[in-house]
Amino acid sequence: MNGSIYDKESQRQALRQQGNDVPAGHLAVHRWYLRLAEPWKIADRDPPSEGLTIMRANNPSVAFYRFLYHTAGEEFVWGDRRRMSDEKLAGLIGKDDVHVMVLYKSGTPAGFYDVNFSDPSETEIKYFALLPGNIGQGFGGYLLTKAILYAGEKKVPLVLDTCTLDHPMALENYRKRGFEIYREDDEEYPDPRLDGTIRKDAGQHVPLAE
């Protein structure tokens, strides 16, 4: 991670949250867009423990996907797909070129990622996260390596994005694997904890937009 980028953004976000330029009920979010030119070339990684398996959830049910998305994303204030209707969400995750990959630890879901292969010029990792109770065991680095190699099978660049709502180490982890920032944006994100979409005490690292 480029410390100066993150430090300046943290300061800018704090100032914006104190100011009047962000609408009530919204969070000031900074987003980084990253690209890895040759994802198929990164070194593979051994599993950090026994009993780890990664499997594709072929045409997953909305209920199963919501379990993954809600459980993994709650602490990072993921609200976008929580607000989607079942019909719209089913249309997204049911596409042949969208692969929902699930990490299992001894048969129990421990994390997941989405890969979108629809663009022939680049592949996108849309979501990536571990489920609670699985952080700090080396699963994240292992799963990220496997996700990059899986996405790299098409032999095209890989893109993803992260933001100031995500885990503080997310940007660093991506850059350690060769991802480079190609764009940055500021956005105003409606706080899903204020309308009941997510429980109000979630995301302790992000102050409520009150």
Image (tube, rainbow, N blue to C red):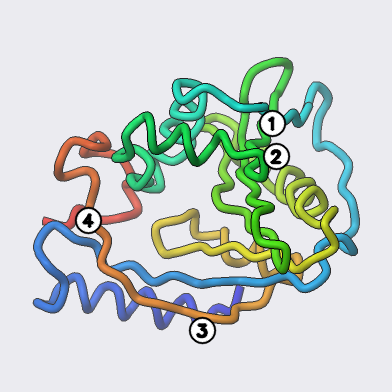
| Circle nearer the N terminus (1, 4) | 1
| Circle nearer the N terminus (1, 3) | 3
For image coordinates 82% across by 52% down, the residue present is 149
Relative image position of residue 146 (x, y in whole percent): 79, 46
Identify which amino acid the numbered label 1 is placed on. Leu
Mark 2–mark 1 distance (CA, rounded to whole Å):
9 Å
Mark 1–mark 4 distance (CA, rounded to whole Å):
30 Å
Relative image position of residue 8 (x, y in whole percent): 41, 83
Q: Is 48 above or below relative to 5?
A: above
- Dot 3 corresponds to which residue? 4
Mark 3–mark 4 distance (CA, rounded to whole Å):
27 Å
Badge 2 vs badge 1, beta-carbon distance below 8 Å = yes
Q: Is 41 left or right of 143, judged from the image as shown?
A: right
Q: Is 98 left or right of 141, judged from the image as shown?
A: left
Q: Is residue 176 visible?
A: no
Mark 2–mark 3 distance (CA, rounded to whole Å):
27 Å
| Circle nearer the N terminus (2, 3) | 3
Mark 1–mark 3 distance (CA, rounded to whole Å):
33 Å
Badge 2 vs badge 3, beta-carbon distance below 8 Å = no
For image coordinates 35% across by 76% down, the residue present is 186
Label 3 residue SS: helix
Label number found at residue 60 = none
Q: Determine crowd level at label 1: few under 14, some 14-19, many 20+ residues with C-alpha closer than 10 A.
A: many
Locate the N terminus by quadrant. Answer: bottom right
- Dot 4 corresponds to which residue? 190
Relative image position of residue 144 (x, y in whole percent): 71, 50
Mark toward the viewer: 1 or 3: 1
Label 4 residue SS: strand
Badge 1 vs badge 4, beta-carbon distance below 8 Å = no
